[in-house]
């Protein structure tokens, strides 16, 4: 989601909640644009500006698609390993965050090969 510098953090959060409610209602496959698109791990310069996660391509609606789509639109997001540095990244509709191995275990996870299925721009 692009950030208008004139909006407060509370306004951005409210717009994000509205956006996510519509996505959850439609169970839409997540795709995202990150203004800060560099992998959040120190030393990694991999860019992930536009991502279409293509969760529908796994052919597992109850094991992958539905749980990850619900996690995305509920605001929890999900984690996946960066295709370059192989460290865990927490993806949400607002940002990417670096997370530890332990933190990643407590979050919904993308399939190991997620980056070969997803489309990046």
Image (spheres, helix red, strand yellow):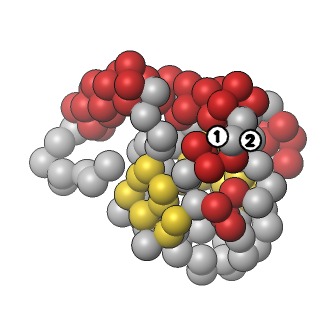
**41 up-or-down from 104: above or below:** below
Q: Quarter-wise, where is residue 33 in the image?
A: bottom left
SS category of the residue bearing label 1: strand
Q: Nearer the viewer, residue 96 or 116?
A: 116
Q: Position of residue 104 (x, y in %)?
A: 78, 42
Marks 1 and 2 close (CB-CB < 8 Å): yes
The image's mark for residue 34 is none
Residue shown at 13% from the left, 48% from the top:
6
SS category of the residue bearing label 2: loop
The image's mark for residue 78 is 1
Q: Distance between the residues labelled 1 and 2?
A: 5 Å
Residue shown at 85% from the left, 48% from the top:
101
- Earlier residue among tags 1 and 2: 1
The crowding category of the residue bearing disc 1, from other C-alpha atoms within 10 Å (few below 14, some 14 to 19, many at least 20), is many
Residue shown at 44% from the left, 50% from the top:
31
Q: Would residue 16 appear left or right of 5 to someone viewing this image? A: right
The image's mark for residue 109 is 2
Q: Where is residue 7 in the image (x, y as percent from the top left)?
A: 17, 42
Q: Would residue 74 appear left or right of 39 to someone viewing this image? A: left
- Residue farthest to the front, as pictured: 59
Q: Where is residue 16 in the image (x, y as percent from the top left)?
A: 32, 33
Q: In which quarter of the image is the C terminus?
A: bottom left
Residue shown at 61% from the left, 27% from the top:
66
Residue 37 appears anywhere in the view: no
Q: Which of 36 and 120 is in front in this view?
A: 120
**40 up-or-down from 72: above or below:** below
């Amino acid at each position: 989601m692009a950030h208008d510098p004139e909006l407060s953090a509370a306004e951005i959060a409210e717009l994000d909640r509205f956006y996510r409610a519509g996505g959850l209602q439609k169970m839409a496959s997540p795709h995202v644009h990150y203004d800060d698109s560099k992998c959040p791990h120190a030393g990694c310069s991999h860019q992930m500006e536009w991502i279409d996660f293509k969760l529908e391509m796994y052919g597992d609606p109850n094991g992958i698609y539905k749980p990850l789509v619900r996690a995305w639109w509920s605001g929890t997001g999900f984690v996946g390993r960066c295709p370059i540095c192989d460290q865990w990244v927490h993806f949400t509709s607002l940002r990417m965050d670096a997370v530890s191995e332990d933190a990643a275990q407590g979050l919904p996870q993308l399939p190991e090969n997620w980056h070969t299925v997803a489309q990046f721009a």
